[in-house]
Amino acid sequence: MKKPENSLYPPDWLKVAKKDWHRMKIMLDEEDAEAAGYFLQQSLEKYLKAFLLEKGWKLQKIHELDALLDEAVKHNEDLESYRDLCERVSGYYFTDRYPALVDTGLTCEDIEKDVEKAKRFIKTLAGARI
């Protein structure tokens, strides 16, 4: 089977970003903080990639939100105020995907706090035309 190519069309990335956002909310309802955090990270990653692709960025296979934010800030300096969110949420990718030697202590309340700031982040991205 041939490996599919990733789309370079920003609306495709936005569609999947919204799907991951919905999955995150389902996982919060199920009280699965690790999965909710993972899908929050995935959603923000795709929102950032849509934003960057709109700006002519060359698609890269990267999961670190703070590295994507470095590129995004070049186009909108207001995004810098979300660095703490991106750094924290980047860690959620690993929390759900790799076994930890100790309990991370991640709670649904932690994710819900990040969701509120993530909503503002997404609006800032959208305001910059994604």
Image: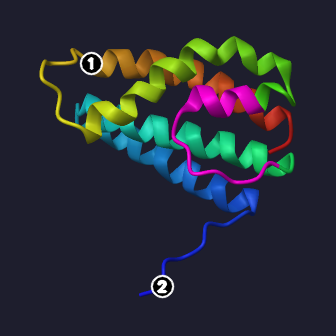
Residue 72, picture quadrant: top right
x then y, percent, for residue 62:
55, 44
At x 52% / y 19%, what residue is drawn? 87
**Which quadrant would the C terminus be assigned to in this image?**
top right
The stretch of residues the image draws in magenta is 57-71
x then y, percent, for residue 68:
65, 34
At x 23% / y 34%, what residue is drawn? 32
x then y, percent, for residue 28:
32, 33
Q: Is residue 122 above or below residue 15?
A: above
User: Disc 2 designates what residue?
Assistant: 2
* Residue 61 located within the stretch drawn in magenta: yes
Answer yes or no: is residue 22 visible. yes
**Which quadrant would the N terminus be assigned to in this image?**
bottom left
User: Disc 1 designates what residue?
Assistant: 106
* Residue 107 located within the stretch drawn in magenta: no
Instruction: Tell me the amino acid under the disc marked 2.
Output: Lys
Q: Rate crowding at label 2 as few (under 14), some (14 to 19) or many (20 or more) other CA atoms within 10 Å.
A: few
Q: Secondary structure at mark 2?
A: loop
Q: Rate crowding at label 1 as few (under 14), some (14 to 19) or many (20 or more) other CA atoms within 10 Å.
A: some
Answer yes or no: is residue 116 visible. no
